[in-house]
Amino acid sequence: MASPKKIEDIAFSLPLFGVILIIPPIINVFSVDRTIFGVPFFVIYIFAVWIALIFLTFSLSKKLPANGAKSDDAVLDVQVDAPTNQHDAPPK
Amino acid sequence: MTLSTNLIIFTAVAYISFLFLLAFVSDKRARQGKDKFLRSPLVYTLSISVYCTSWTFYGSVGSAARNNFEYLAIYLGPTLVFVGWWFILRKLVRIGHRQRITSVADLLSSRFGKSSRLAVLVTFIAVVGTTPYIALQLKAVTTSIQVMSAAGVQGTFDGIDTIGLGFAVAATMAVFTILFGTRNVDANEQHHGVVAAIAFEAIVKLVALLAVGIFVVFGLGGGPSQIYAGAQAAGIDIHAGNIFGPRWVAILVLSAAAVLCLPRQFQITVVENANEDHLRTASWAFPVYLLLMSLFTMPIALYGLSTLPNGANPDMFVLTLPLSAGNPGLALFAFIGGFSSATSMIIVATIALSIMISNHIIMPIALRSSQAMERGDGRGVTQLLLTSRRASIALVLFLGFLYFWLSGNSDALAAIGLISFAGVAQFLPAMMAALFWRHATVNGAISATFIGFIIWAWTMFLPSFSGTSDMVAALVAQGPWGFDILKPQQLFGLGGMDPLVHSVFWSLFFNVSTLIIVSLFTQQSTVERIQAALFVDVFKKNSDRPPNFVPGSASVKDLFFITQRVLGATRAHATFDEFATDQGFRRSNIQPSSKLILHLEKELAGSIGAASAHVVLSSVLSGHEVSLEEVMMIADETQQAIEYSQQLEEKSIELETTAQQLQHANEQLKEHDVQKNDFLSQVSHEVRTPMTSIRSFSEILLTHDDLSKAEKRKFTSTIHDESLRLTKLLDEILDLNNLERGVRHWSNEPTDIFTVLERAIAICEPMASNKNAKIITNISPDRLRVLGKADRLTQVFINIISNAIKYNDTQNPQIWVSTLTTDEDYTVQIQDNGPGIAAADRLRIFEKFSRGRDVETRYESGSGLGLAISRQIIHHMEGQLELAQSDNKGTTFKISLRRVVPT
């Protein structure tokens, strides 16, 4: 299991790789006049990248460290929030 | 089933009524605290999909028909932003919560020293960029109604023209937004009813588009491959061609910027966010939503292009395909989906804009003119706020309608989506600087945003009118007054580019450069510096620390008065009570501390925006001798020192200490190493001597058979003696080693010192008489107890007394053992009249293997460990063993022990 710092680094590089993969020149490598099951090759490519990004973001979202938002916010909320604005606990 | 205009309008009205009901019930539940579901990550994610307006619902099919797969970039940009949520969105949301941010204008103004100029500029740009977008939604709704009814039987609403329809939609939306968007001015600007409605609409539009997509692809088209094959047969190029060029990148950049900067996106993602952790879900769930939304776009477009007659409007394929396939029910569902996309965008955008307009334009003016402030009933500002909010909503929608009306049926609206994106993208550099660049200044942000806006307006917004205005067309073609260099679409002679790329490049280039250069050459004010630290360092643990300024001499009464005017009496009381409880003192004891002012400023900012809250509080504070600004100036040094250098200092001090400790440890280790080496060489030396004699005598015994019995006996006894000596030496080394390490296992007990001394002297007596020495005692006969161990103590006394006997070579050797008692200590003094210890040796007699000077008596002497062991023993008994005195008339050792006084 990678350390939280490593996970953060992965989270940082993921969108960068995502960008690189869908802009020229890399995307032009896949922009060939070929089809897979009748669908243009590059369409398959883009959607594959897209799904991979979603999947990786999904797995990362479970592993990234807790924000500490609750504890921090709790302190702050008591201080500045009107009672009507108490945040709920995150759904389990 | 046939579709009449009546039916269509009835469906729309019924749908809207349902939304009203939904919003009403949700609002009510939220008020009762039953808002678990409303505040779930799912609802949050769905509401973010307000990104998908009718422009994407209908328009992306049109875009796919015209520009191939370019529409994908519109969805990929936001996908990447959400994939990288940990770094930008999370920070935005955290700051939004901490600083009570109410809008994108509020964010920038708050970060850049609560500047109202910047807030006004941002608001203005947002209105200019969004109004046409709202008009676009109105157009989509009216066009879709027309398309639907053109296919059906004529109905009673036929007399109504597009303009009337557009007005009706705008008016209905205004009513809805006013009802649910301005029910109150609660602190966070969160609107649960509206969010619930938006989330519901998100589901409707997704399901509608998927339904049409599945129907077209699998019902009509016979699968994706068939569709692509059909399109190719119809002469359509299904391959990418050269779409992945600069325009593709520009659209990616714009859509990524839009999902952060569009007022409605900011409203939903940041302001309406109930819990930062919801982003964790949205980070992947929103991209999933976008992916589903774009899945069938291209097949629908291709199927429409290849089957519908030439000239059919591709923007309406989503409706016309089901209609032409004889499935009006599905078409009606699709219509509701499109209607959902349009209305959700209109509602959220209007709320976001109205908050900006009322907080940053109307309120500051109203507060300065201060009429509202003078109403003593405490409801003045609250009322003013609600009224201005409602008026702003009406105004925004009216502007949208006006734009829709004036642009008529021209195509000017078709491109407005990207134009609007490019407009709000001008906030992006300032926003990123707000989050990540501590030294960006307000002047940099204002000038950058302004220049970006001007270039955008000139190169993109203005040319969008060239279809409707001949004057604009001429301007675009020839440049103003014939200046080629200023041609809107070939600025500075940069031609040959796609107009979109051209505009995005120049506007963002000037925007970013101006931001950097102006920020580098201007200074931050104190407020800015404080805010910058709070924004940039929002994730640092102590970033909450309030700036330590003294609030001048405003009284609590003044502050309460002002709070009451803005928030109303009930909430003002609640705010103060809460503050008092928090700080742990009674309400009557509240002091006008900096904490209180900060607390109030945040609370007020939640209602009227940071800039206005600042103005309001300053108006109270600046009437006194010391103004807030001035005091903050005074506190600036401290603040700066704290924010910038404290951590650095802490770090370096920490490092220094660690280094010192390491150095110290290293020295000790070295010392120990030296000691160990010495000890080892001494031990080997000590062991060597007896070993050598044992070896040589045994060799003699082995090799010389002719030795006499007496000689043999002598040699054997020498070997025996030496072996004994060796054993003793090793025993002592072990003993010393144990003593040095065995502090843990040492336990002292009360020991009868008299008995111990008696015993030690008795043991030494034969040795003394052997040397004709006399032991004279003067021991207190009291049965006193000391801390120690009887055996060990005896060992020490024997060691010292026997040393005194052994080394005493005077004629008449005498040893005196006397005792001295104080309340706490018991001291034994052992004195002799021997030759004394040489001055040079006195300091090191307690060291291991050090002996008295007399080398010749070496064989008589012990291992040289005796005193070292004794001292260790006494040390363990918490006592002291010292050489009290020594000269050529004798030596005195003193052993102090701790008395155990019976309690």
Image (cartoon, coloured by chain):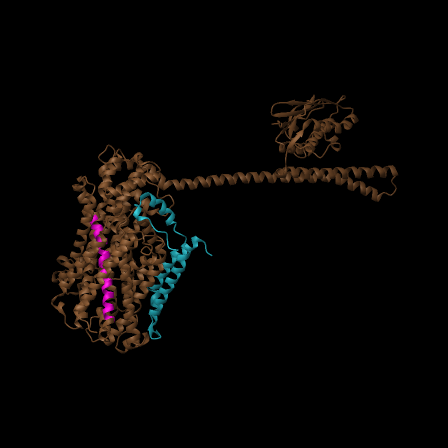
Left or right of B815 on screen, residue B158: left
Nearest the eye: B236 or B201: B201
Q: Nearer the viewer, residue A57 or B811?
A: A57
Quarter of the image for residue B315 reads: bottom left
Percent across and percent down for residue B344 are 24, 60
Chain B painted colour: brown
Would residue B606 appear left or right of B164 to someone viewing this image?
Answer: right
Provide residue A1's location: percent of width, then percent of height. Answer: 47, 57
Q: Main secondary structure of the magenta part?
A: helix
Residue B238 seen by the camera:
no
Colour in which chain A is drawn:
cyan
Residue in front for this viewpoint, B829 or A75: A75
Could you say where residue B869 lies in the image, as x and y percent from the top left?
67, 34
- In-front residue for pair A11/B274: B274
Rendered position, B415 above or below B718: below
Answer yes or no: is residue B413 visible. yes
For residue B841, what is the image quadrant?
A: top right
Q: Eyeballing the image, is B176 above or below B155?
A: above
Tell me if residue B825 comes above or below residue B563 in the rendering.
Answer: above
Location of the N terminus of chain B (image quadrant): bottom left
Q: How many marks?
A: 0
Stretch of the chain drawn in magenta:
B330-358
Which quadrant would the C terminus of chain B be assigned to in this image? top right
Residue B165 image offset from top left, x and y in percent: 15, 63
